Amino acid sequence: MAQWQHPAWVNWLYPSALSSSERIGRYSTFFSTVEVGSTFYTKVEQTQLLRWFDAVVDDFQFCFKAPQTVTHRLSDRPWNEIQRDWLAFIESLRPLQSKLGPTMLQFPATCDERSLDKVLALCDMWTLETPLSVEVRHLAYFDKVHTERYLLTGLSERGVNRVVMDSRPVFSTEAYCESLVDAQSKKPRVPCHPIATAQHPVIRFIGHPDLPRNDVWLEQWAAKLSQWLLEGLSPFVFVHSSDNIAAPTLAAQLDQKIQLLSPNYQPVLQLPQSQEQSSLW
């Protein structure tokens, strides 16, 4: 998931008596990773990072987003200040390495090909033994020729994973409800190029609130993920929906579709079955 807190998940994933601070631990018994956006928006104190670290099961992996002061200020901040903030963030994650998945450098649509050398320079500064991933949103990075090839080559040479954004489902209809209006205003509408540049490709799937409509794209991803697993890759998949209420259900459906294609695959996502679950949608 892209979060571990959602009020609609109470009395389904979480007992109502469970405090909000305990939910990350409960979440980690269902899911093997989480995308953490709070580090993008603000500085999270080291004590808080360590509390999250201690709360989850041993084989859980956090995927933290780099601060926006690093990724979203490339053109208007001094380079030495960006480097300072990035190195400080890396050091804050060092004690958490045993539970780190791919850390995300997520760049905005305003970050065009003129910033690519800086993007790769930030990758060169990564000193942890855990994976790093890069998400780009400017359309120049999807041209299938010069800029995209330069990006893919640069990431591959550095062992850095490309984040593949799949927002096709959420843009597949007009925005006929509030959650779709909100999602279409915030999520990037970029081509979906499922290319792995390193060992841990990262997928961000933005689902449609009409759940059956997602089947065609979930089946495509089940096929691609099965192929990657057969090749020995270890992908990370983050499933969103327009309001994220149904995101766990979509993730479970994807897990089941992979199992059908890969008989040796062991499903890892077992969600609780309850009346509360069926009443959510």
Image (spheres, rainbow, N blue to C red):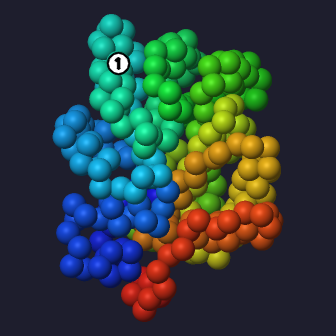
**Drawn side of residue 201 relative to residue 109, left or right:** right
| Closer to us: 180 or 69 | 69
| Closer to us: 229 or 165 | 229
In the displayed structure, 163 sits above or below 23; it is above
The residue positioned 36% from the left and 29% from the top of the image is 94
| Closer to us: 119 or 35 | 35
In the displayed structure, 11 sits above or below 121; it is below
From this viewpoint, which residue is outermost toward the bottom?
275
Count of number-bearing discs: 1
The residue positioned 39% from the left and 64% from the top of the image is 27
At which x and y percent is residue 80? 33, 7
| Circle 1: residue type | Leu
**Drawn side of residue 243 relative to residue 212, left or right:** left
**Drawn side of residue 146 relative to residue 132, left or right:** right
At which x and y percent is residue 68? 34, 31
Task: Classify mark 1: residues with Cα within 10 Å, few (<14), some (14-19) or many (20+).
Answer: some
From this viewpoint, which residue is outermost toward the front?
58
The residue positioned 64% from the left and 55% from the top of the image is 168
At which x and y percent is residue 277? 44, 84
Q: Which of the 4 image quarters holds residue 179?
A: bottom left
Residue at the disc numbered 1: 87
The residue positioned 26% from the left and 43% from the top of the image is 50
Q: Could you tell me which secondary element the residue under label 1 belongs to?
A: helix
Is residue 220 in sight in this rendering? no
At which x and y percent is residue 74? 40, 18
Is residue 81 in sight in this rendering? yes
Q: Which of the 4 image quarters holds residue 44?
A: top left
**Drawn side of residue 73 relative to residue 141, left or right:** left
In the displayed structure, 226 sits above or below 63; it is below
